[in-house]
Amino acid sequence: MTENIWGYLPTSGHAAGIDLIGYKVEATDGGIGKVDKHSDEVDSSYLVVDTGVWIFGKHVLLPAGTVRTIDQTERKIFVDLTKDEIRNSPEFEKERHVGDAGYYEQVGSYYTNRHPM
């Protein structure tokens, strides 16, 4: 992981301005869904992933620092998380995911504590 969980790793292949909506997201042990929304804002970059039927339509907020690589040709994003880690993540809160420092701290802490930097 990266020191800044809310920033893309330099080796991820991410380029600001690329529309990631619709990209498939792959955990270390299989597919988890598709990108529904994303942000490239400095120090608050994230993906909102629609997990579909995998976890009964749950959406999850993944900090950009969880992204290992982006394959733009295949339109896939590989994250450094297991399905269970994503399944057990804090509930996505649509109303709080933009600009709520406390929510960002809660989500960031969950992922940072599972993957020490």
Image: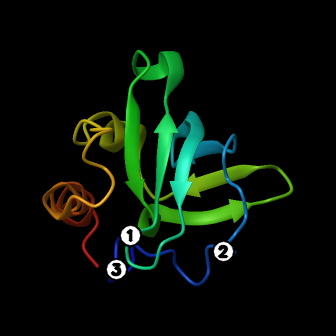
Q: Position of residue 66 (x, y in %)?
A: 43, 62
| Residue 45 location, quadrant | bottom left
- Tell me if mark 1 has few (under 14), some (14-19) or many (20+) residues whose alpha carbon lies within 10 angstroms of its own: some
Marks 3 and 2, how far apart at CA: 17 Å
Vertical side of 27 occupied by 98: above or below: below
Q: Name the residue under label 3.
A: 4
Q: Is residue 68 above or below residue 4?
A: above
The residue carrying pointer 2 sits among few (fewer than 14), some (14 to 19) or many (20 or more) residues within 10 Å by Cα, namely few
Which SS class for mark 1?
A: loop
Label 1 with label 2: CB-CB less than 8 Å: no
Inter-mark Cα distance, 1 to 2 = 13 Å
- Amino acid of disc 2: Ala
Give the image quarter of residue 1. bottom left
Q: Which residue lies furthest to the right in this view?
A: 73
Going by the numbered disc 1, the residue's amino acid type is Ser
Q: Residue 44 carries which label?
A: 1
Disc with the residue nearer the chain's start (1 vs 3): 3
